Image (cartoon, rainbow, N blue to C red):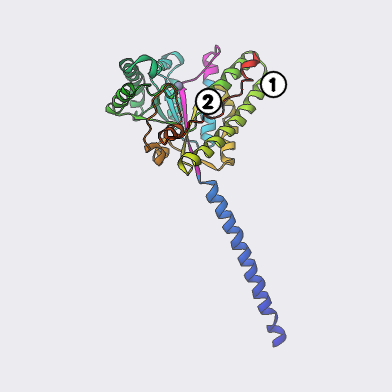
Amino acid sequence: MKAIDSPAPRFRLVLLVAIFLCSLSSMAAERERWTAQERAVAFTIDDLPVVSNIPRNSAQLHSITDKLLATLQRYEIPAHGFVIGAKIAAQGEDHLHAWLDAGLQLGNHSYSHPDANAVGADSFSQDLMRGDAALRPLLQTRDQALEYFRFPMLRRGNTLALKQSIAEFIQSNGYISAPVSIDNQDWVFNRAYDRAIAAGNEALMEQIGLAYVDYLSTIFAFFETKSMEVLSYEPKQILLLHANAVNADYLDEIAEMLQRRGYRFITLQDALKDPLFNMPEHYIGNRGLSWIHRVAEGKGMPIEMEPHESGWLENLE
Ligand SMILES: [Zn+2]
């Protein structure tokens, strides 16, 4: 009997080691999943319906909207679009219906995209309400609320009186200002991309598009590090992009780059629950800034701006 019994402890040991290794590897997988879900970003896409630096016909404008929406849906990105009221009539409100049909939300980005620092409180407020009047009836036909306002160029007023006056106007009209934590120069890349499209230069389009995705990766790395320096944690981020051709053509690559960095995609409402966006900011100046820079300034830290496009795009002409 001993000869039969004796392998059992060894077998049990092998079994125990196997179970232990299995549980280690499943713990590692669990940890990987947890890490992968730790980062979160809300996409906000400005200047709807479409940004175009070159003449485009209606079909070409719609192609940009269609590509953006298809990719947002494919990656289940609950983006929030911000509309410039004056462009609705010019480009067609069917773009906005397409956004709503895709289950996405829309906010007010003013009527004519004024610079709060330049036009003064009264003119700025009137323009905001003109933007409201252009967008709200359309949203009402779809039972959608209009809750969020995005400052053009992220400029909120360059004197304390102006800033407070505009902030009070926004709040008293039931709006929530939608801040940005991940600012960038996608519009500079798009300007060059549009020129390459107009020139029919596909090789250059691809060169610009791939450089743009790399650049956005650098931007995220910068703000992840900056978040740790300023906040000692990485908040739920709010990304600003524009409804343009380079984003329409490269949003797949951008979504995949972000997934590789461990991001999941959340709504603006969800991101705004992060403590970062309840932190006060007291920046008074001309610049449109990430909320992280604003909080840094309030803590007496120097504002170190995010990487700028290096200038080669401007030299392409
Ligand atoms: Zn804008």
Taking the view exactly as shown, the residue that stands out farthest to the right is: 3
- Marks counted in the figure total 2
Quarter of the picture holding the C terminus: top right
Say which residue appears at 67% left-offset and 20% top-offset: 204
Residue 139, x across and y down, in percent: 36, 26
Is residue 44 covered in magenta?
Answer: yes
Residue 190, x across and y down, in percent: 57, 21
Classify mark 1: residues with Cα within 10 Å, few (<14), some (14-19) or many (20+). Answer: few
In front: label 1 or label 2? 1
Q: Is residue 264 left or right of residue 119?
A: right
Q: Which residue position holds label 1?
A: 203
Q: Is residue 19 above or below residue 239?
A: below
Quarter of the picture holding the N terminus: bottom right
Q: Nearer the viewer, residue 46 or 289?
A: 289
**Which span of residues is magenta-colored?**
39-61
Q: Which residue position holds label 2?
A: 66
Q: Is residue 80 above or below residue 30?
A: above
Question: Where, by quadrant of the figure, is residue 144 drawn?
Answer: top left
Q: Earlier in the sequence, mark 1 or mark 2?
A: 2
Q: Amino acid at mark 2?
A: Asp
Disc 1 from disc 2: Cα separation = 23 Å
SS of the residue under disc 1:
helix
Q: Quadrant of ligand 1?
A: top left
Looking at the image, can residue 4 be seen? Answer: yes
Is residue 68 covered in magenta?
Answer: no
Say which residue appears at 62% left-offset and 62% top-offset: 22
